[in-house]
Image (cartoon, grey):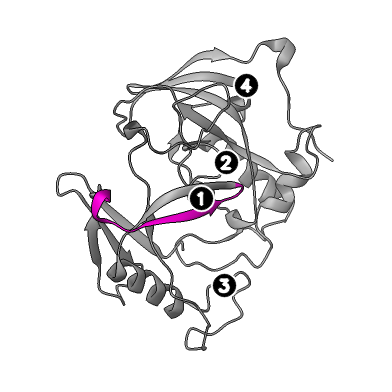
Amino acid sequence: MALLRPLVDHQANTLTLTSHDDDQAPLALPLFPDTSVLQQKTVTVWKDSLEAFDMGDAAAEWVTTFIRNHASHDAVNTTEDEADLQVPLLRLVTLEDPDLGRYSRQAHPKLPGIHASFADKTPVTIGCYASLDTLNDELVSKDISKGATIPLNRFRNNLDIQGTLSYEEDQWLVVKIGEVTFYITEPVSRCPMPGIDQDTGVKDTWGGPTPHLLKTRHFAERTDRGYFCIHALPLNKGTIHVGDSVQVLERIPEDQQRFALSK
């Protein structure tokens, strides 16, 4: 999926699906489709059942063809592209605007009105370059990555921040970026996905950063998870531009702060 490159054009109201190698013709879809003319489908995200809307046969065929054409980029990169990978017909679905009042997947039990859509937990995750520098230093100095460093896009955040102290985001509670104020809920537990090069779709031969994070960035409540970056809930609508300042409005009280542990 890292090799599927969506292009968003707000002025044209289009979402264009493109392939990383331009081997598949792009497909332009409406960015905000009229859901009244789309077929409704029930989909499952973790334990939640949601009413979604099918984007049509052309979108389904494009996504299915893309996955079938990239058979080598499976979990362990052992399958050749030309192999007969058995992929069923996939469907691309969307959700309607939650402001219409017919859709709800609360991102936090005490903050009604903030929805997680198809995300795991929160609609936004935030990463910090200073923390990445610390992680890369550890991966290289301990010869875990065989001299390689990883970019922040491995963690697929919505927002990336420069100019912080390393891991100070662990203690943030409320921050403002541009016009939007965010409530920080928790650090992000990491799956093996950060071990996949987002430009090539190839898995790191050295195992990726997640095993190291499990050893050096877990919490007392969950010693079976490694944490990096933070979950965030937008408390209002607004515009954020590249280069906007970040204001830390509130930090977790000292008597409630938790710090990452090492095994």
Q: Which amino acid does label 2 sit on?
A: Leu
* Residue wearing tag 3: 74
| Viewer-side label of 4, 2 | 4
Would residue 145 appear left or right of 63 to someone viewing this image? right
Does the rendering let one see residue 88? yes
Query: Which label's residue is closer to the chain start, 1 or 2?
Result: 2
Residue nearest the observer in this picture, 184 or 165: 184
Q: Is residue 51 magenta?
A: no
Q: Which amino acid does label 1 sit on?
A: Pro
Q: What residue type is labelled 3?
A: Asp
Q: Residue shown at 46%/36% (left/top)?
A: 104
Query: Which label's residue is closer to the chain start, 3 or 2?
Result: 3
* Residue wearing tag 4: 171
The reply to whether discs 3 and 2 touch (Cβ–Cβ < 8 Å) is no
Q: Which stretch did the figure color magenta?
A: 35-47
The reply to whether discs 4 and 1 touch (Cβ–Cβ < 8 Å) is no
Disc 2: CA contacts within 10 A as few (<14), some (14-19) or many (>=20): some
The reply to whether discs 3 and 4 touch (Cβ–Cβ < 8 Å) is no
Q: Residue shown at 41%/39% (left/top)?
A: 103
The reply to whether discs 3 and 1 touch (Cβ–Cβ < 8 Å) is no
| Viewer-side label of 3, 4 | 3
Percent x, y of residue 19: 34, 68
Disc 3: CA contacts within 10 A as few (<14), some (14-19) or many (>=20): some
**Figure check: 225 above or below 182:** below
The reply to whether discs 1 and 2 touch (Cβ–Cβ < 8 Å) is yes
| Viewer-side label of 4, 1 | 4
Q: What residue type is labelled 4?
A: Gln
Q: Disc 3 and disc 4: Cα gap in Å?
A: 36 Å
Residue 151 - label = 1
Q: Disc 3 and disc 2: Cα gap in Å?
A: 26 Å
* Residue wearing tag 2: 132
Residue nearest the observer in this picture, 237 or 128: 237
